[in-house]
Amino acid sequence: MPTPPFAQLLRQLPAGVATLEGAELRFGFVNEAMRELVGAHSEGKPLAEHRGSLPESLPGVLSQVLASGKPYTAKACACGPLPGSKDCRYFDLAAEPYHDDRGRVTGLLLLALDVTAQEEARQQAHELALTTRHLDARLRVLTETAPLISFSLDAGGRVTYVSPQWYRFTGQPPTADLTAIWPLLIHPDDRLRVLYQAEAARHAGTGWNHEYRLRRFDGQYRWMLSRALPEVHLPDPPVFWHGALTEIHDQREVAEALRRGEAELRFLADSIPELIWTANAHGLIDYYNQYTTAYSGLTKDELGPTGWVSLLYPEEQPAAARAWVESVTHGTTFEGEYRMRRHDGVYRWHVVRARLLADASGPRWFGACTDIDEHYRLHQVLQTQYDELARAHHDLDTFVYAASHDLKQPTLNLRGLFHELSQAATFHDPDQAVMLRLVDDELSTLEHTLRDLAATVRSQRAQQEPVEVLDLELLLEEVLLGLRPQILHGNAEVEINVTEAPGLLYSRANLRSVAHNLVSNALKFAHPDRPARITLRSYLTPDDHQPVLEVRDNGLGMELDNPDNPTFQLFARQHTHIEGTGVGLYLVQRIVRSQGGHLTVSSTPGEGTTFTIYWTRPE
Amino acid sequence: MKHIVYISRAVRPLSDDDLNALLSQSRHNNARDGVTGILFYSHGNIAQLFEADDAVADNLYERIARDGRHSHVQKLVDKPITSRSFGDWSMAFHPLEPQGFTTLQGFLLPHQVPPVPESLAIADALLVDLVRLAVFGPDPSQPYQHPVPAPLT
Ligand SMILES: Cc1cc2nc3c(=O)[nH]c(=O)nc-3n(C[C@H](O)[C@H](O)[C@H](O)COP(=O)(O)O)c2cc1C
């Protein structure tokens, strides 16, 4: 038994100490720490009945230890109400047999050392190890299956890790010296740049992000994006860089193609000898081609987003600016003819056109200014000549009219004098009667010619006559009334049928002139063997509803070169034996054409003629 | 003497209070520094023309370009002028609560903005018309929502 100072010491020992005496293992000495395990008042009681928190199996085990006389230890035994619960504590238990004077085993010294903290730490470490292994596995799967190459470098630039994709991509053997071979796989044009950038980043302790071409297993160089970040543990400088390499070849190609496309378009636009520009959706110009700067002598900056307007003729600027704002507001096409100032101060006419078109980056204005100065000048010259001609023509008409008018009175006088003469004078000539009749005829012809010339000029003047809706029936009746003597004389029969198209939008004087000439023509060229039968019919063409006047007779008929588009010459006459000036049909044709219409003729010699007047131009 | 025109985008929509603060700050500074012109604002879209002595104008543009309230500041024109076209400095926008603003000095409703001064060159007048159209849309009496495209490169 321990003596008091030892007993004191043992009592205060932070490990549990107890003696278990005799075959029943009764508690003898129990120190403080052990008491916490087995409970108070255990002294003298057998272990089996006063086990406290000690493991259930312990009394059985210790009986065997007692019997065998060999020491026993159990590591990290769970002691407590519920092993594994929160209150559960862990103890290293040791049982040491002790002997009496004769060397017989009489009891056990039980030691219990609290290792709860260690055990918990161990268990946590175990769990941590499990999680780490799990994470590790996941990371490995990720790094080894993701479509990118991951890598690690140390501060000296040595490659310490590369994922298996690297070998698959490059086709290098697993034994390859990564640090040595990697730079050699980089495209020669990119190599120095990449090495320099990576080294600079390592020196500065920063990450990097650059693109380069890496040689693939098949020898092709593919564009890669390399990004890496340093692993930082402040305050120390970074020791490792971890990164990933992604293939971006296809994106690069597309971007490159787009850049090339843009560049090609610019090249094209710059090569065209026209002023070409583009503007954003708000009408602010963001691109002028080279020709624009060459033409204007201004830089792109001097031109600015709206500077084009200052190239215009000063008086034309406000209207052009307004028109542009208008186009931008509504997205409508801009078009106009403007004088634009060249670098030498000369203004040249341009037609300026701009349209809003949508491309991949949204709507933009595309504009072009085409030099039409030559055309414009030519046009001006032509216009002047045209004006002069028109004036000359007018003067000529006036002259003809005046002349025919002025000749009318002398002709009348001549006829009067001739009449007097033929009454009063006698001629000694057997052909006197014939001669007199010839002179009389010629005088009549002269009169008619003068009258018709005047009418022709009048009809030309009448081209701009006002149009109105005419009642055809009424108007044709009027015309027939004017021709009554001829109708009666020829015993002619004239029929008017306007039920299909009773009205017509036309100038009254022109229509009267056309009808008068056609009917009098039909009367004049009546067949000698039969009385004239003339029908006037107004109708609409079946297919496009054009108003038409048809004048049909049963007269002499005529020879036609081109019945669908006949041309009648002034003073040309078909039937020379019949009096007339040949002005009538020419006049009709002129009037009809001047109003946009046309006429056709069909005729059978000896049977009759049909004139068809199409009043309007078909749409 | 020069004038500068720029467009920009507010970083976030400016509230009535933001606009009020900008108006009084700028009115105060501009009156002091001899800056005249006009600012258009609608739904985050900003356009401004200002006129001042060269050094003042350059300095102001520097400050404005660095201002964190907006970004994508794009200078459209920066050129010498012989005389001012604006009598003072004002700001046109649609407040959510217009009552408080109508009496403020230098505030204009967008449809009350007077026509572009005659004294501006046609090209500059056209520019002001176009940026006003870009900010307020075809009908300035109605608030107008649309993005001004990012500045060109
Ligand atoms: C869109 C916009 C327009 C501005 N316009 C002006 C201006 O015209 N005048 C001005 O002094 N400050 C203007 N500012 C403010 C300046 O950016 C800057 O904040 C101010 O000039 C600072 O001067 P302060 O602190 O002395 O007032 C503007 C800011 C923004 C965002």
Image (cartoon, rainbow, N blue to C red):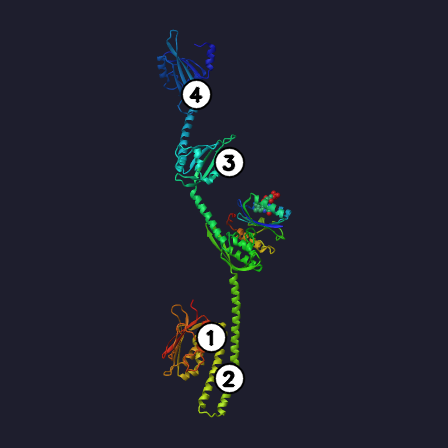
Name the disc covering residue A411, or none. Answer: 2
Q: Nearer the viewer, mark 3 or mark 1?
A: 3
Mark 1, residue position? A510
First reached walking from the N terminus: tag 1 or tag 2: 2
First reached walking from the N terminus: tag 3 or tag 4: 4
Looking at the rendered image, the quarter that the N terminus of chain A falls into is top left
Do the dots labelled 1 and 4 sit on one chain? yes
First reached walking from the N terminus: tag 1 or tag 4: 4
| In this view, A380 is above or below A277 | below
Name the disc covering residue A200, or none. Answer: 3
What amino acid is labelled 4 in the image? Answer: Val
Mark 4 neighbour class, 10 Å CA radius: few under 14, some 14 to 19, many 20 or more: some
Q: Quarter for ligand 1?
A: top right
Name the disc covering residue A234, or none. Answer: none
Asked if residue A130 lies left or right of residue A455, the reply is left
Q: Chain of mark 2?
A: A
Do the dots labelled 1 and 2 sit on one chain? yes
Quarter location, residue A245: top left
What amino acid is labelled 1 in the image? Answer: Asn
Q: Tell me the CA gap for discs 3 and 1.
A: 97 Å
Q: Tell me the CA gap for discs 3 and 4.
A: 53 Å
Quarter location, residue A604: bottom left
| In this view, A177 is above or below A314 | above
Q: Chain of mark 1?
A: A
